[in-house]
Image (cartoon, rainbow, N blue to C red):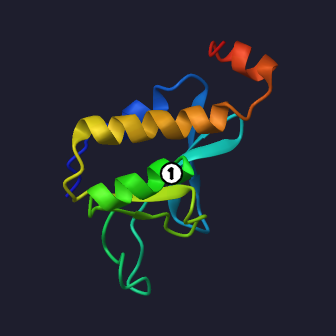
Amino acid sequence: MNRYPWLEDYLLSKPGAVRDFKLEWQWHRWLVAGKMFAALCTPDPKYAEHAGRTMVILKCDLRRAELYRAEFPDVVPGFYSDKRTWNTVYLDGQVPEAVLREMCDESYALVTAKLTKALQRELGLL
């Protein structure tokens, strides 16, 4: 069950965000300027620890990533991504809505901070 029905629209509401589907991974992804800032998937049974749990994967500052994981059991290291700087949030879990929104905002901000100043201006971020 997805406790966060607003999530997909929230990610898409970010300036310049587009959604695609990565067929070979079976992931819905949200990108800005071709860079992924969020992904949604439900791993199959071969990934026993995650199998059948729908999750969102978000970029995160290294120190904050560890804090989120320590505070919320439903936040774990990024699934199939750099486990230091990406977090997985189980959507059937108990992460407060405000915290998940904050994590989405942070992921988007981290990715857009690496874009050129011209692209940031174009997106209205400067």
Left/right of residue 80 with respect to residue 44 in the rendered view = right
Left/right of residue 53 with respect to residue 1 in the rendered view = right
Relative image position of residue 10 (x, y in whole percent): 39, 31
Relative image position of residue 92 (x, y in whole percent): 22, 59
Relative image position of residue 78 (x, y in whole percent): 49, 63
Q: Which residue is mark 1?
A: 63
Q: Nearer the viewer, residue 85 or 88?
A: 85
Q: Is residue 77 above or below residue 85?
A: below
Residue appearing at x 64%, y 38% in the figure: 111
Mark 1: which amino acid? Answer: Arg
Q: Is residue 76 above or below residue 102?
A: below
For the N terminus, give its image quadrant. bottom left
User: Does dot 1 land on a helix, a strand or a loop?
Assistant: helix
For the C terminus, give its image quadrant. top right
Q: Is residue 11 above or below residue 20?
A: above
Left/right of residue 110 with respect to residue 97 in the rendered view = right
Q: Nearer the viewer, residue 67 or 55?
A: 67
Q: Is residue 3 visible to the viewer in this orientation of the structure?
A: yes
Q: Is residue 44 above or below residue 95?
A: below
Relative image position of residue 60 (x, y in whole percent): 52, 48
Residue 49 figure quarter: bottom left
* Neighbourhood count class around disc 1 (C-alpha, 10 Å): few under 14, some 14–19, many 20 upward: few
Residue appearing at x 23%, y 53% in the figure: 2
Q: Is residue 39 visible to the viewer in this orientation of the structure?
A: no
Residue appearing at x 76%, y 22% in the figure: 119
